Amino acid sequence: ERGSVREIFSTPKHPYTRALLRSIPKLSTRKKHRLNTIRGTVPHPLNRPKGCPFHLRCDFALSGVCDVAIPGRTVLEDGREVRCFLYSDEQLIATNDIGMIASDDDLVEEEQRTFSGESLLEVKNLKMHFPIKKGFFNQTVGYVKAVDDVSFAIHEGETLGLVGESGCGKTTLGHTILRLYDPTTGEIYYNQNGNGKVNLANLNDKAMKPYHRDIRMIFQDPHSSLNPRMPVLEIIGESLKVNGLAKGSELEQRGRELLQRVGLRTEYLQRYPHAFSGGERQRIGIARALAPNPRLVVADEAVSALDVSVQAQILNLLKDLQQEFNLTYLFISHDLNVVAHISDRVAVMYVGKIVELASTEEIFENPQHPYTEALLSAVLKPDPEARQSQTRIRLEGDVADPANTPSGCAFHPRCRHAQDRCQTDRPELRQTTNGHFVACHFAEELELTGIME
């Protein structure tokens, strides 16, 4: 399909275009429905089906037509170009008869979840400072405060979204929780499923090894996180072999199941990472993380490399696995639409600190920190018509340097509500309403705008 931006987004014609648009997470459906997906997988370039390449995944495929011939270009009255037999002269059907791929009434409603009791993971006053060394004697002249006095808890079966600008410390926080970094100070308490709590921050590498089965990570970069010398089966099955969970034919069967769950073909098991696209590599990384049936998964930009249709499949998969195995997620992402859809609570991070923490509804409907309000105003709406009425808050300056943070509130040089006190007094993360924590001196006085539809 080819047309203007406004035409494509307001009145998509081709079933594939419509399916893509309906796969995009919408803020209004964050807690109500599963995402629409396109069934099946993209055909392999060396083994494409006869006829229209999309007919095996299309809800409107015409038997004896779409599976036989490749559709030619059809020019509609408004100048739109569509390659689809539904619009050809021989099979012309009115646009209203085609309808959307699915209506909101067809979507599966999800239950509202609540969490209580002990936390699965509790982080207290965690700091990860990297030394800055200079001079002939390699002396330490300062520190990059990537994570600076962070505290939060995640309940079992919950998804905590972590958002913020690039460089704010989100990934470093995830790596520190998994002990890929040794924290400078602080505690990381992990609930051992009835065997008490253990402080992961105090464990050495040998003592930490058993917990790497329970706490897994989906890395942000699918290129560098996969060993280029290992085929997919070995990449996925490595944790299973190390922990004695599977071997031989059982290991291969488990690998096939995992590939199918993340939307890849089972014949890919013996291929190497260089043979895959970035999105396919990310799916392999997701399968590897889920292989040993972990309890906690740190997902660092887990779906950022995927197109919207595969993204919807993976998000639904993550929710299905969470319900099936009672998984807990720390979901790190820049995409607030995705965060709104998958998260139960959201933490907003700025220059190594959490500045706001609350339920997803509270964060999006009633932000209490000016930085959160600015992030929400930058959310790009897929509908060009709705985008025109959107008011964008443009922050002045750049993100503060974590090696030389401003005095007082680190956000005050960019904050339009800053007062004299903000330049000298550092705000603590405090509870303003039930379950809503904010690090702002004037949180109760400000009237900020959310974006929830």
Image (cartoon, rainbow, N blue to C red):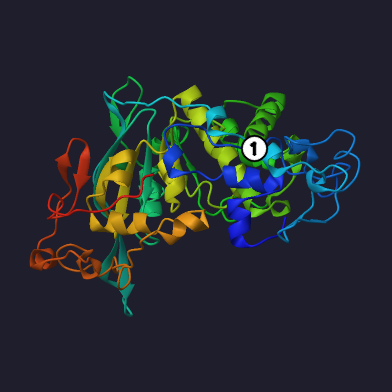
- What residue is rendered at 10% in x and 61% in y? 425
Q: Is residue 83 above or below residue 340?
A: below
- What residue is rendered at 53% in x and 29% in y? 105
* 53 lies left or right of 174: right
Which quadrant: the N terminus?
A: bottom right
**Is residue 139 or residue 216 the one in the foreground?**
216
Image location of residue 307, percent across then percent down: 61, 50
Q: Is residue 46 above or below residue 65?
A: below
Q: Secondary structure at mark 1?
A: loop
Q: Is residue 187 visible to us here? A: no
Q: Amino acid at mark 1?
A: Ile
Q: Check disc 1 and report the residue beneath it.
A: 101
**Is residue 448 or residue 312 the one in the foreground?**
448
**Is residue 103 or residue 271 the one in the foreground?**
103
- What residue is rendered at 44% in x and 61% in y? 388
Which quadrant: the C terminus?
A: top left
Image location of residue 315, percent across then percent down: 53, 38
**Is residue 418 or residue 72 the one in the foreground?**
72
